[in-house]
Amino acid sequence: MDIQGQKDEVLRSLGLGQLNSGTYYGMWAETHGRESITSNSPIDGRETAEITLTSDEDYERVIAAAEESFTKWKSIPAPRRGSIVREIGEELRKNKANLGRLLSIEAGKTITEGEGEIQEMIDVADFAVGLSRQLYGLDIASERLNHRMMEQYMPLGTVAVISSFNFPASVWSWNAFIAAVCGDVVIWKPSSKAPLTAAAIMRVVERINKRLKVPEAFFLMVGDGKKTGNKISNDTRIPLVSFTGSVPIGKKISENVAKRLGRSILELGGNNAAVVTEKSDLKLAAKGVSFGALATAGQRCTSTRRLILHEKVYDQFMEKLKDIFQRAKIGNPLDSSTVVGPLIDQEAVAEFKAAIADARKHGGKVLFGGKDAEIKDLQGGHYVVPAIVEANPEMEIVKKETFAPILYVFKYRNLEDAIRIHNSVPQGLSSAIFTQDLREVEEFISARGSDCGIVNVNTATAGAEIGGAFGGEKETGGGRESGSDSWKGYMKRQTITINYGSDIPLSQDVSFPV
């Protein structure tokens, strides 16, 4: 079946058509006479479908519906909320293949990555189910006679999730499923570059809500990024905004939310590096570095963008790396043999070329790739040959995140030098070291080592598991999502004191002589 036939089949299977509503608030807003945007597949540049935008009136309907639903949703016992999320996870399992294929069509991910992202949503749902029975507080010893102190966590209210195109499904679930079992309701504003995936997922959620007859916990609004993002970040009715995207936009959202004393969870830029030492397993390291650099065509926030390579193994390692890059098939992501699919749009291709030109201008040497990739029968797609660029770590372009498959390579002499180079960029998301030396491992994961939120040993910078809290430091924003105790970010903490005596003794031996 050709690409257009696959598109049509997937849309039908998921209850989508050529024109789809982008607003859900317990019902779908009408599509007739509405302003819409087109979803174009980066595979061939052709239109996939249209989706209508959320109007100002729709925005208010969504907010009102969320506020009303919150009063009901938060009253449902947490384990019951977890069971509802479990049902959504099961429905995602049933639709994994088609949702994964739609994601590949809309965002250009390979088939295995598309289905892998839906599997990640299923995994988060499973995690959230267990979490729903573990929203623990604390008992605290009181200094006052006949007093008991404790802490408990309560839901915040309406949470807004603004997600990006590169993970158009799973990033929402990291926030939404966790927030939902905590008792919050969630408004999703997806990227306008991948709105159909969001609409399809909401149709899955809708089916479960209708079958179980439960209050709505999840809402959708597809809108212009700047306009809708500003409305959300300035809206006092939304106590928490979770944003995944660029540093400049993240700073603006953070500023708007902070002005009204709200909370924000920020997952911003990554400029991730892998250190390969002379004591590493070079075959293992080559696979880890190449996966980090090539997966999702370098469009992951955790993509490996910098390689810090010991001078003694430089030539040997580069030979292995170039061989992998040479063999990695570039092309249609719906073909299971493809390793590198398209960039999201032509603007991304232009940024790829501009970054390489900048590196060349300042002394960088392109060792591999760095040009357009002409794919037969897919002339409208956005394909490039991933680049390996020998560079100076002090170049300005190296310190910027370019969302494309460019791997900058530097030599180093000792681990202290490697860590200095590693930490010299403004971003601090993911990091990796490849070594068989325990002392080097401990140095890299110590306070003197990586300054990132995620540290990997003998594995890639990309490919985090959902059980660990995901996020980074410095310009990455400091946010944490998904696993560990990140659930606390979606709740408010209360300290409770109970006096079960017949007097009121005061703390700190304060007296009140009345």
Image (cartoon, rainbow, N blue to C red):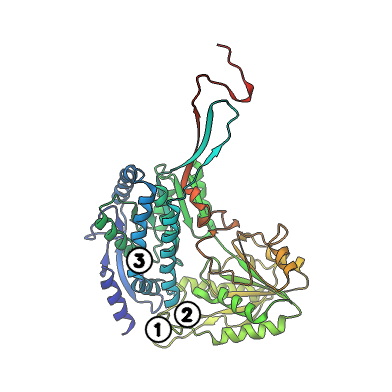
**Residue drawn at (73%, 72%) of the image:** 437
Whether residues under marks 1 and 2 lie with C-beta atoms below 8 angstroms apart, the answer is yes
Residue 49: image x %, image y %? Answer: 30, 70
The answer to whether residue 28 is seen in the rendering is no
Question: Which amino acid type corresponds to the residue marked 3 in the rendered image?
Answer: Leu
Question: Which amino acid type corresponds to the residue marked 1 in the rendered image?
Answer: Leu
Residue 481: image x %, image y %? Answer: 50, 56
Q: Vertically, is 247 above or below 302?
A: above
* Residue closer to the observer: 368 or 103: 103
Quadrant location, the C terminus:
top right
SS under mark 2: loop
Q: Vertically, is 438 above or below 496?
A: below
- Label 3 crowd bin: few (<14), some (14–19), many (20+), radius 10 Å: many
Disc nearer the start of the sequence (1/3)? 3
Residue 383 - label:
2
Residue 21 - label:
none
Residue that badge 3 annotates: 92
Residue 74: image x %, image y %? Answer: 36, 44
**Residue drawn at (27%, 64%) of the image:** 20
The answer to whether residue 354 is seen in the rendering is yes
* Residue closer to the observer: 351 or 409: 409
Residue that badge 1 annotates: 378
- Label 1 crowd bin: few (<14), some (14–19), many (20+), radius 10 Å: some
As measured in the structure, the alpha-carbon distance from the residue carrying label 2 to the one carrying label 3 is 30 Å
As measured in the structure, the alpha-carbon distance from the residue carrying label 1 to the one carrying label 2 is 9 Å
Nearest to the eye among marks 1 and 3: give it. 3
Instruction: Locate residue 183 relative to residue 58 in the image: left or right.
Output: right
**Residue drawn at (38%, 79%) of the image:** 44
Asked where in the image residue 277 lies, by quadrant, the reply is: bottom right
SS under mark 3: helix
